[in-house]
Image: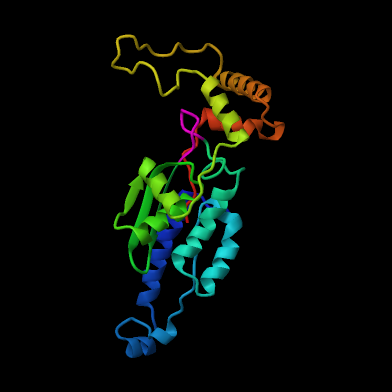
């Protein structure tokens, strides 16, 4: 089942409210055994729960079995996150992630170990695929909470993570498509305070028609770049609406 972030927040709030109502309605027998309004430890039930982004869904079952069998909470979360990191067809993180403006894949990751409240993170890491595991290594093997850039990469190599080229052919072609697309929505150019700035000239065509033309032009260029037909529209969407998602668990 796919749940939007808005629905997740709404349901979490409703769940908290329901939990509060349930706590006030505990039978008197439980209140007598465990104190005012609280069940005894024998009456409470803890069940493992895993929440993750949609691109981690395929890896939840195995991680849940690991967690239910007594596995560490952080290790279970990383088992989910590692899936998209290893998947060259998932362009959100890891191998095959969409690159920066220079065509280089840069990755960030952070983690927290719930039972001990320890944390670790890395930022702007190049050439290392499983940065979620590097973040955990920062937590376990250093006195820091965060390492960034070249230092984080050197640390990762020092503790055993291999360097590898993370840019796949598909992600490179999406990057080329993005590079070749220029419009008044670019992030570069004169800002509003610049005397050379001028508002975009309104198009006389209906907006729906304008967008349709943009999509068709980009799709044709995607075909010219060799992007497979069944992925061309997805590539166009990544250019028109650059994704900012990741994987979380």
Q: Nearer the viewer, residue 125 or 51?
A: 125
Image location (x, y in percent) of residue 141: 36, 60
Image location (x, y in percent) of residue 54: 55, 51
Up the image or down, 192 lies above or below 24; here it is: above
Up the image or down, 192 lies above or below 30; here it is: above
Number of dots carrying numbers: 0
Image location (x, y in percent) of residue 163: 50, 45
Q: Residue at x 51, y 69 (%)?
A: 67
In the rendered structure, which segment of residues is drawn in magenta? 99-106
Using the rendered image of the protein, determine whether residue 209 is visible from the camera's viewpoint: yes
Q: Nearer the viewer, residue 116 or 102?
A: 102
Horizontal side, residue 198 vs residue 227: left or right: left
Horizontal side, residue 132 vs residue 145: left or right: right
Horizontal side, residue 62 vs residue 159: left or right: right
Q: Residue at x 57, y 22 (%)?
A: 211
Using the rendered image of the protein, determine whether residue 1 is visible from the camera's viewpoint: no
The answer to whether residue 150 is magenta is no
Up the image or down, 249 lies above or below 224; here it is: below
Which image quadrant is residue 135 in? bottom left
Q: Main secondary structure of the magenta part?
A: loop
Q: Nearer the viewer, residue 121 or 37?
A: 121
Horizontal side, residue 107 vs residue 209: left or right: left
Image location (x, y in percent) of residue 85: 54, 49
Quadrant placement of the N terminus:
bottom right
As drawn, the residue found furthest toward the right would be 229
């Amino acid at each position: 089942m796919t749940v939007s972030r808005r629905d997740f927040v709404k349901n979490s709030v409703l769940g908290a409210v329901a939990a509060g109502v349930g706590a006030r309605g505990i039978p008197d027998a439980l209140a007598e055994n465990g104190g005012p309004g609280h069940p005894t430890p024998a009456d409470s039930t803890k069940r493992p729960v895993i929440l993750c982004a949609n691109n981690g869904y395929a890896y939840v079952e195995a991680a849940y079995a690991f967690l239910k069998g007594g596995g560490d909470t952080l290790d279970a979360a990383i088992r989910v996150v590692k899936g998209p990191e290893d998947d060259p067809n998932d362009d959100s993180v890891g191998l095959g992630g969409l690159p920066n403006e220079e065509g280089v894949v840069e990755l960030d990751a952070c983690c927290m170990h719930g039972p001990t409240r320890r944390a670790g993170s890395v930022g702007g890491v190049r050439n290392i695929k499983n940065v979620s595991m590097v973040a955990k290594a920062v937590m376990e093997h250093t006195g820091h909470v965060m390492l960034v850039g070249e230092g984080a990469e050197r640390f990762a190599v020092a503790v055993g993570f291999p360097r590898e080229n993370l840019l796949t052919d598909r992600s490179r072609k999406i990057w080329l498509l993005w590079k070749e697309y220029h419009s008044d929505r670019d992030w570069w150019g004169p800002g509003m305070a610049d005397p050379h700035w001028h508002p975009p000239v309104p198009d006389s065509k209906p907006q729906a028609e304008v967008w349709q033309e943009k999509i068709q032009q980009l799709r044709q260029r995607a075909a010219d770049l060799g992007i497979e037909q069944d992925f061309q529209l997805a590539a166009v969407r990544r250019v028109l609406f650059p994704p900012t998602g990741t994987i979380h668990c």
